[in-house]
Amino acid sequence: MMKHWYSSTALILLGVVFLALTMLSGAYLTGARLDLTENRLYTLSPGTINLLKAIDEPITLEFYFSEEASRDLPMVRNFSRRVQELLDEMAQRADGGLEIRRIDPRPFSEQEDRAALLGLEGVPVGPGQETLYLGIAGTNRVDGREVLPFISPAREAFLEYELARMIYILIQPERPRVGLLSGLPLTGEMDFRTGRPSEPWAVYEEIDDLFDLETIDPGAETLPENIDVLVLIHPREMGERLLAAVEQFLLSGGRLLAFLDPFAETHPGPDPNDPSGPQTADVHSTLEPLLSAWGIDFSTEDFLADLGLALQVNLQQGQPPVRHPGILGLNRASMNADDVVTGELEAVNMASVGWFELTEDSRLDLEPLLTSSRNAGPLPTDRLRFLDDPAALADEFGPTGERYVLAGRISGEVDAVLGPADGTTPMRGRIDAILVADADFLADRYWVQRQRFFGTTLLEPFANNADFVINAIDNLLGNADLISIRSRATSRRPFDLVDELRRSAEQSLRATEQRLEAELAEAERRINELQQARPDADLSVLTAEQEAEIDRFIARRLEIRQQLRQVRRDLDRDIEALGTRIKIFNIVLMPLLLTAFALYMAWRRRRAFRSRMDGGAA
């Protein structure tokens, strides 16, 4: 009886403790969570925490979300909760420096008028075309204002960065000044097909949003004063005086980010692929004679072909895509994981890229940021002018087995080669710069898509090209906090092993197809020789020897086609086998391991219980 009473009392006490813990957790652990994702996708990055701690004057973030207009949009409502949770967590980390206000801009209300006044974008949704607001306006105590007009759920991976960037701008008394000289139409150009100017490049808009941008005319003779970082994009028409000013800017402690190109496909001049138009071989850009004086080799006569990183391109509608060794998709293996500029990037796409090397007498250090694979080698840039079949490039170069530096950080002491020797300018100094051997990769088509969402244009990046640019500028400015946020890993998990299987199979298919084409050409040559050697004049009738040659060719072609099908079947079998192994691991092996672990723990507990019982009996 007493034992039963103890058991009932223990159950009641457990129930009371459970209720107490539930109430306490609701009161004190609201919003708390345990992030077990591989890349810690739901944990604030250290850079965000540092920015929040750097808030001196209070900042207010007003989160506008239309509750009623989103009632039939569960994905949008879930995303709004994600935004609210992140804002609350940031406010908690800011120790009173960040105030969060949630506002529901109902139709015809003062809140809706204020949302429109702040520049937030309302999009019509539903059959009644109600207006949906999903944006944030930030203000500080000195009339500073930053706005995210509309936050797309598709950009959830960039949500923390967008909020941290807003806070970063609001806590800065002045934006860093960036001087930009470009030989490419970053701000848009006239589209002669539509008669209207094209939109500015997305990377230009990102730089302009984050920094105080000062554009520089290539024909200028001096640089603007008080710029913190100089960005040169495809600098082709710089005069000697301006180039000397760039040199003096570097020797005086300025920072440089330069995008050079051995073959700029986005160059706004005559189309190098249009044989009917005026042609020019001068579609490259360099920084000579500075590069040679610094001991840096950069060839403008060759570009780098890379089978290991070649991307697939569509040549004609209805035709299968082919891999283009001149258009590269760089992955994590091609990026310097120890550098803050590239350490957390996932993908960067480049086109007709060059490479940098140090000469033996160079006094500079070259730290690679982006590199090729070992399956790469140089080809003449002239080969890109009238290229009909990109796959043919694979047969024209020999991989060297080396990794080429496509983008790198240079630093060290150099002597002036262009500066005037009048004693008023430094003739020697330390330079710090980041050089990139491609300018085309800044174009939208290599990294971002523009999508229309309820009448609003949204940018949907599929590569980190712009991230690289912003990271590089931030790093040259000395701001590492925003870099760490910008470069956070995403939830994208590419099937690297499957891609490698497909790449190997494509190479086998390519070799077999080449053998078939060679045998086809040989058979046609043999048939033509037999036709020309006939003594009779009736060439419309095939001889027995010709018919036998054709029959042999048809039989051989069928055999090679069977080999092609077998290669494809082997590829599918390898991919299916990989999928089967993964399924077995997830469905069978993991539950077995967990069951075995549970049985082991139960056995240990039972053994310990028996040991205590035996000890008590003794």
Image (spheres, grey):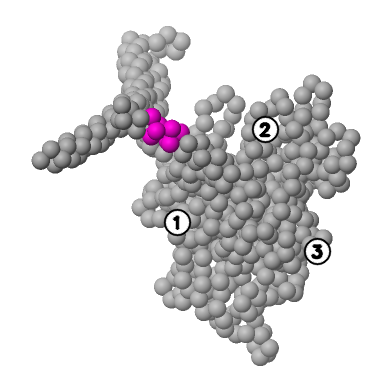
Query: What kind of residue is marked 2?
Result: Arg
Report, in whole angstroms, how far the alpha carbon at label 2 lies from the one at label 3.
Answer: 33 Å
Region in magenta: 8-15
- 455, above or below 430, in the image: above
Do residues under tags 2 and 3 come within 8 Å of each other at their CB atoms? Answer: no
The residue located at (69%, 48%) in the rendering is 202
The secondary structure type at the circle numbered 3 is loop
> In terms of depth relative to the viewer, which is nearer, 524 or 404?
404
Q: Which mark is residue 77?
A: 2
Locate residue 170 relative to residue 112 in the image: left or right: left
Would you say residue 13 is visible in this rendering? yes
- 225, above or below 59, in the image: below
Q: In which quarter of the image is residue 496?
A: top left
> In terms of depth relative to the viewer, which is nearer, 25 or 447?
25
The residue located at (31%, 30%) in the rendering is 2
- 363, above or below 236, in the image: below
The secondary structure type at the circle numbered 2 is helix
The residue located at (79%, 62%) in the rendering is 141
Q: Residue 142 carries which label?
A: 3
Q: Choose mark 1 or mark 3, whichever is in front.
A: 3
Query: What kind of residue is marked 3?
Result: Val
